[in-house]
Each structure stands twice: as structure tokens, then as C-alpha cells.
Image (cartoon, rainbow, N blue to C red):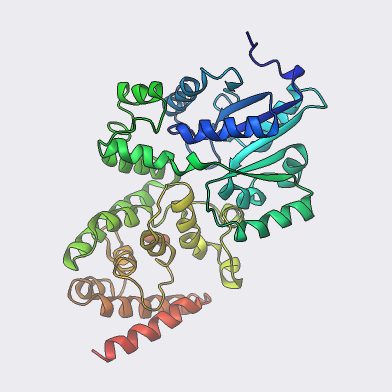
């Protein structure tokens, strides 16, 4: 019988990192394929702990950990580590690799198995050069994955950081954890997509259908926003979400999207300027000169990146509505206009010159409301000696012309 965690004796181990929410057949197939292909002695599944910027939820961590145990228990070459789950504070990959390095012999080669998409992100991780020098990466891809974009990133990693990265195609990776959760929510079967034990676990604890179902998903977002926003800002976002729903009803827009975009539009607002700049770098948000000088203005662009990476928003329209809610832009979608205006007129807004006029226009002609609001903002910022973002200027020109032609 194999012993658990004889790290000192291993010559070659692989780390399989992931949230494993839920762990599925794709994960197991990928880990087994890498094990065999690279002659790995032990694959260590390490469910992520408190990912940077994610709140801690012990119950959620335990579910993911236990599902990972259930999914791997029958394979003698697999084991699960609580290393990240039990770590207090934020959890970074570099800390995990360092911890493994300490446990293993000097000669031991450590591989880190990750999705191909994550490879592009490595440079945004903590201490990428040190990380690349301490372990080798195995990028698992599904067949047909477009490698062109990826190859550029890989070249940089290889040349600049002497990173060691290899690819492995794994057919079963078309299964995704998001699909598993969505199928459970939609009451569709997940049989054969996840191990039977995991399926039973999900059903037993009502994962994704009770505490993780659609409405609680909103609750989850609200809970997180409550933690990262000031009470006043939190009230404001509730007001924007509700106003956005009213506007969506008025203009036959998508009510759910309006609500979500309204809720999340200021999710990056309450960080300090310094934090905003650092996070923009971390999340690859490009900053022009104006944004660098006025980091607060970057909260909308950063908010869009956070909505995508941290709040799981995939819909581009929602992302854009968050992205352009402060500057506006020419030719906005209905949702973008709704959020732009809702931000202006939500009921908790303290009165300012022009507010009542925009409130009135908002429900009669949203394009005119947008023009008026842009005009108002530009004037206000000029008075305050702030630089006006070019996006706002072109937006105003656009809507002026648009409304004149009506
Ligand atoms: Fe904002
Ligand atoms: Fe706002």
C-alpha cells in the first residue's frame, strides 16, 4: 500500500491546482494523462484557498476539499492537500510551491498543471520569475485550442524567465465546472460528467441549488460588495441596480442584466488610489495618462475587470456597461446607457443642478438624457479643473449629433 505524503522520497511530483467547484472528470483525466505522460510519481490536488481578493468562506472551502477527496480517493497516485485551504490570509501559488519545495528533496522536480488560459496570466501572478524558476508548468488544453495567442506568451515566459512549459492535449477538458453548476441549477443530469461520489455529494448537500442557486448568487455578490464598499457606496449600488431595472422595463431591456450591472458597477470604487493602480496592473487594465493621474476614474475600467475575474460575469454587455459607466462612450448599447443614467439619477443621489432634468429625460428619451448628463459632467469637471477623458468628449459629440438628427 502506498503511503500518504512521502514527499522526501519523490523525484517527480505534479501539483493540480484549481477551485474544484465542482471537480469533474476533466480534472481527473487531465491529472492522470500528465501523470502517465511525464512519469509523475504523485499528483497532488490542491484546492485553492483564499484567492487574492476573494472572501473567505470556510463552508465553501470544505465542500470543495471534500469533493476533491471523493474524486481522487480511488487512484493510488493521487492525493489531496489542505495546504491552501488551511492557509490564513491570501493564498498565492508561489507560497504553495515554496512549501512543497521545503517538504521535498532537492532533486525533486515539481510540475504545476494548469489550464492553457492561465498560462497567459502567469506574469500577473505574485513573483512570476521566482515561480517559473521553482517549478515546471504543464499547460493542459482541449483539442482545437487556439495556441497562436498563447505561443507569444509562452515565448516571453521561456526567453525572459527561462520558464519551462509544456503542453498536453486532454479531450475530456471540454467539461467545465461552470457547466456542472449550471446543469445542477437547471435540474439537468451531471451523471458521468463528475464521479458518482461527487454527484451524490452535490445532491446530498444541495450544492448550487440552494445556497448556490441564482438568487443566492446575487446574495453572494451583495455579501461581497457589502465587505468591499462603504455603507454609503453600498446603498448607492442598490439604488443604481433598482433604477437600472426600472429603466430596463421602460425601454424593454434585459432586466436581469440591468440589475447585475447596476449592482457591480462600482465594485472597484472603494479601494485607495494606490490599490486601484496596483490592481489595474494585476488585472491587466491598461491605464492612459489621464487615468494614471486620476486613478479614481479608473474604477470603472478596473470594476469591469473585477466583475469578470472575481464575480464571474461573462456577459460582455454587462462588462462594458460597468467599464464605461463614468466616461460614457460613443454609440453605447442600451444597457450601457441604462447604467450610465441609473448611476446619475438613482434615488439616493444627493441633489445637484440638473438632476431633476436628467431624471425626467431618462424616462422620456434616454439618448437625450445621456447627452444632457455628459454635458453636465464635462462642465462640472472643467470647473473642478479635472482633465476630461476623451471618451466623454467623443460621446458628447456623438449624442449631440444623434439627437439633432432626430
Ligand atoms: Fe462609479
Ligand atoms: Fe456609481
Any part of residue 89 in sight: no
Coordinates of residue 347 in the picture (x, y in percent): 24, 59
**Relative to residue 33, is residue 169 depicted above or below?**
below
> Residue at 33% across / 41% down in the picture?
182
How many numbered marks appear?
A: 0
> Residue at 59% across / 70% down in the picture?
288
> Residue at 27% across / 31% down in the picture?
210
Image quadrant in which you'd find residue 16? top right
**Relative to residue 388, is residue 249 depicted above or below?**
above
> Residue at 34% across / 22% down in the picture?
200
Task: For the N terminus, give its image quadrant.
Answer: top right
Image quadrant in which you'd find residue 191? top left
Q: Answer with left or right where residue 109 lies relative to residue 402.
A: right
Q: Answer with left or right where residue 215 lies relative to residue 23.
A: left
Coordinates of residue 162 in the picture (x, y in percent): 79, 49
**Where on the image, by quarter, is ligand 1?**
bottom left
Task: For the C terminus, give its image quadrant.
Answer: bottom left
Return the residue nearer the eye: 194 or 222: 194
Coordinates of residue 102 in the picture (x, y in percent): 76, 24
Q: Answer with left or right where residue 35 lies relative to residue 247.
A: right
Any part of residue 102 in sight: yes
Amino acid at each position: 500500500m502506498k503511503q500518504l505524503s512521502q514527499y522526501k522520497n519523490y523525484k517527480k511530483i505534479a501539483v493540480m491546482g484549481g477551485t474544484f467547484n465542482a471537480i469533474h472528470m476533466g480534472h481527473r483525466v487531465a491529472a492522470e494523462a500528465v501523470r502517465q505522460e511525464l512519469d509523475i510519481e504523485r499528483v497532488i490536488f490542491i484546492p485553492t484557498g483564499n484567492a487574492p481578493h476573494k472572501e473567505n468562506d470556510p463552508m465553501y472551502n470544505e465542500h470543495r476539499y471534500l469533493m476533491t477527496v471523493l474524486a481522487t480517493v480511488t487512484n493510488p497516485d493521487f492525493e489531496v492537500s489542505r495546504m491552501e485551504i488551511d492557509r490564513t490570509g491570501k493564498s498565492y501559488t508561489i507560497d504553495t510551491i515554496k512549501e512543497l519545495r521545503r517538504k521535498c528533496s532537492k532533486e525533486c522536480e515539481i510540475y504545476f498543471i494548469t489550464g492553457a488560459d492561465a498560462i497567459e496570466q502567469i506574469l500577473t501572478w505574485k513573483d512570476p520569475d521566482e515561480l517559473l524558476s521553482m517549478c515546471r508548468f504543464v499547460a493542459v488544453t482541449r483539442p482545437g485550442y487556439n495556441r497562436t495567442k498563447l505561443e507569444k506568451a509562452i515565448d516571453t515566459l521561456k526567453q525572459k524567465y527561462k520558464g519551462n512549459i509544456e503542453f498536453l492535449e486532454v479531450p475530456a477538458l471540454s467539461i467545465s465546472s461552470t457547466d456542472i453548476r449550471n446543469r445542477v441549477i437547471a435540474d439537468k443530469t451531471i451523471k458521468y460528467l463528475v464521479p458518482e461520489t461527487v454527484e451524490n455529494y452535490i445532491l446530498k448537500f444541495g450544492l448550487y441549488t440552494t445556497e448556490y442557486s441564482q438568487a443566492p448568487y446575487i446574495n453572494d455578490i451583495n455579501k461581497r460588495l457589502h465587505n468591499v464598499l462603504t455603507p454609503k457606496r453600498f446603498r448607492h449600488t442598490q439604488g443604481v441596480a433598482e433604477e437600472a431595472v426600472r429603466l430596463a422595463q421602460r425601454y424593454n431591456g434585459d432586466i436581469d442584466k440591468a440589475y447585475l450591472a447596476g449592482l457591480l458597477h462600482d465594485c472597484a470604487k472603494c479601494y485607495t488610489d494606490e490599490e486601484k493602480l496596483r490592481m489595474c496592473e494585476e488585472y491587466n487594465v491598461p491605464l492612459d495618462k489621464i487615468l494614471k493621474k486620476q486613478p479614481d476614474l479608473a474604477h470603472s475600467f478596473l470594476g469591469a475587470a473585477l466583475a469578470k475575474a472575481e464575480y464571474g460575469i461573462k456577459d460582455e454587455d454587462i462588462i462594458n456597461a460597468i467599464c464605461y459607466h463614468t466616461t460614457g462612450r460613443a454609440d453605447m448599447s442600451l444597457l450601457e446607457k441604462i447604467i450610465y443614467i441609473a448611476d446619475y439619477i438613482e434615488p439616493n443621489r444627493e441633489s445637484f443642478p440638473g438632476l431633476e432634468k436628467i431624471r425626467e429625460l431618462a424616462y422620456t428619451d434616454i439618448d437625450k438624457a445621456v447627452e444632457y448628463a455628459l454635458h453636465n459632467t464635462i462642465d462640472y469637471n472643467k470647473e473642478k479643473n479635472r482633465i476630461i477623458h476623451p471618451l466623454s468628449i467623443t460621446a458628447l459629440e456623438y449624442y449631440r449629433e444623434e439627437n439633432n438628427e432626430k
